[in-house]
Image (spheres, grey):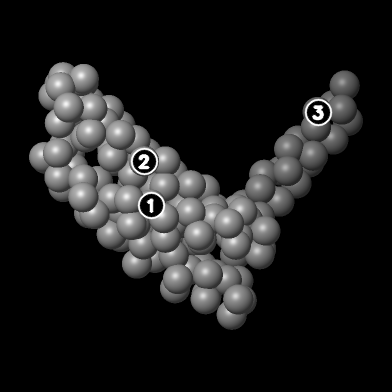
Amino acid sequence: MRRAVVIVAVALLAALGYGAYASTQPPDRHEFRTTAVEAAQSAHDALQTAYLAGVALRDGRATALYVTVLLDGGVRRTATTVQKLALLSPPDADMRELRDELDPMLTEAVQRLGDAAADPTDIDALPALTERLANFLDRYA
């Protein structure tokens, strides 16, 4: 019985040690690229939703309260995925280029979504940014 407890304890310590080691390692290319694509997709989807909701509000097909709640959720989801990407260091030069291309679009997306949340009819700039993110996704997703 005592030997089994020791074996389980050693296995548990080994697993915890590996978990601590793995959590401190920089991301690999796949993890970084996947996280970047998730952030771009989140921003793209939130911008499309904001645009459609703004059009619906402007045309009288949606209420301001509904659109505000909808946009608030998009802002939060996008900010969360952007923050997740910001916490990762690019593992190589190619991923630094990817980050450098995506970061300005994500920053603008969060700003535009915030503007749309304050004024849901302020949507004129959203389609162009949505298109730029779609082009990014076509290349990297």
Amino acid tagged 3: Val
Amino acid tagged 2: Gln
Position of 42 relative to 134 (above/below): above
Circle 1/circle 2 CB separation < 8 Å? yes
Residue farthest front in this picture: 59
Q: Which residue is depicted at the point 39% across and 65% down?
A: 103
Front position among marks 2 and 3: 2
Disc 2: which residue:
48
Give the image quarter of residue 64.
top left
Disc 3: which residue:
5
Q: Is residue 110 visible?
A: no
The residue carrying pointer 3 sits among few (fewer than 14), some (14 to 19) or many (20 or more) residues within 10 Å by Cα, namely: few
SS label for mark 3: helix
Q: Earlier in the sequence, mark 1 or mark 2?
A: 2
Disc 1: which residue:
130
45, 99: nearer the viewer: 45
Q: Which residue is depicted at the point 59% across and 80% down?
A: 93
SS label for mark 1: helix
Gap in angstroms between the C-alphas marked 1 and 2: 7 Å
Amino acid tagged 1: Thr
Front position among marks 3 and 1: 1
Q: Which residue is depicted at the point 54% across and 55% down?
A: 137
